[in-house]
Amino acid sequence: MRPVAVIGIGKTAFGAFPDRDLRSLAVEAGRKCMEDAHVKPSQVEAFYLGNFAGPSFVGQNHLAPYIAGAMDITGVPCTRFEAACASSGSAFFHAVSAVGAGLYDVVLVGGVEKMTSQPTPKVTEILAGAGDMCGEGRAGATFPALFAMIARRHMYQYGTTREMLAAVAVKNHANGAKNPQAHMRKVITMEQALGGKPIADPLTVYDCSLISDGAAAVLIVPLERASEFTDKPARVLGIAQTSDQVALDQKEDITTFKAVKEAAQKAYKMAGVTANDIQFAEVHDCFTIAEIVASEDLGFVKKGEGGPYALQGCTALNGPRPLNTSGGLKSKGHPVGATGVAQICDVVAQIRGEAGERQLQRHSLGLAQNLGGSGATAVVTILGAAA
């Protein structure tokens, strides 16, 4: 497999945009990305799109050519990928695989979701479809309920506390307040996080990610051609996608995501690094407990130590291993189909030294972890500065 590099990134702001449609968001991100990479639409050889539920949210099917055509990209393969909240992470994985295999040289990968076109109860119902509808769905379980069970079990097994969950929210809101494209640029206190409106015990509104609209895009090429387009490419050092059971009750241990652990180990092996080498990461904090579990499953800390690690400030901007410098899903926003590619954009921005107020001093090796459902799909990507 030949080495692959990211040569362009582009994102919209994340938020609630009643005057924007799904296609306009995706086109904005795609055009920003092509401009960043100095690539014309006629040079794009394939378009891979991550989108979870465009047909349900906005009533539009056949989304990949629908969006590509609006960017003047025609005559090439245009394919939509669906893997719940890991949809665009999966699209990126398959695009990297295709470029690495030599099928294409210039591939645009996008991710988009327009969620606020539906009322919150309907959004919750649509999102629940990423779980086991025959079991969990029939029982009335939504994702806040499922992750609340994960949190409760983690508390029981490892002594994790509400303060540890709240520390994740406080830190990510602090980071998001420095991100001009974040949905909720709002600093919160520990007291606010602990006293938030109850959603599903022990989770409050401050433990849950946002219902957002938004899009992101990246352009990838073989590493050997990267210098034709940019002087600041980021190399894809390792990447893996794995899967597990969809239903929570089918998992061996609900305090860990087997798919994340397996994807991480494959990505580390491919990159020739260990968890200790990773300087920073964008992880899938759909709920605060998910960031704590991710820090453990990715090998940053031992099992059960993710909560204290967060509470001690180890994952803050000035900590030994910053997590979610973008604000994460919690503050940046979570337009589910866009999240995976947005994470890649955020990691690349850090590697380039373009993260503004959130810029890290150690930023040459980063990781992105994208989760689908309650751990049924996981994509882990390791990116580094190209030599």
Image: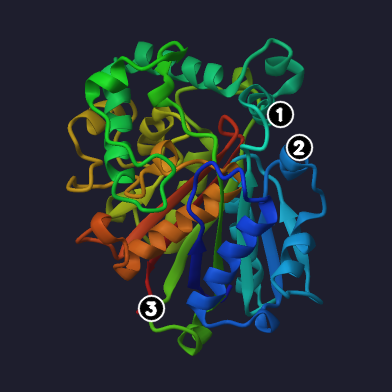
Q: Name the residue under label 2.
A: 56
User: Residue 56: x, y in percent?
Assistant: 76, 37
Quarter of the image for the N terminus: give it.
bottom right
Q: Which of marks 3 and 2 is in front?
A: 2
> Which residue is at 36% across, 35% downward?
296
Q: Which of marks 2 and 1 is in front?
A: 2
Q: Which mark is residue 232?
A: 3
Q: How far apart are marks 3 and 1 (CA)?
A: 40 Å
Q: How far apart are marks 2 and 1 (CA)?
A: 10 Å
Amino acid type for the residue under numbered disc 1: Gly
Q: Do the residues labelled 3 and 2 touch (CB within 8 Å)?
A: no
Q: Is residue 291 above or below residue 214?
A: above
User: Residue 167: x, y in percent?
Assistant: 26, 28
Q: Name the residue under label 1.
A: 129
Upstream in the sequence, badge 3 or badge 1?
A: 1
Amino acid type for the residue under numbered disc 2: Ser
Quarter of the image for the C terminus: give it.
bottom left
Q: Residue 218 carries which label?
A: none
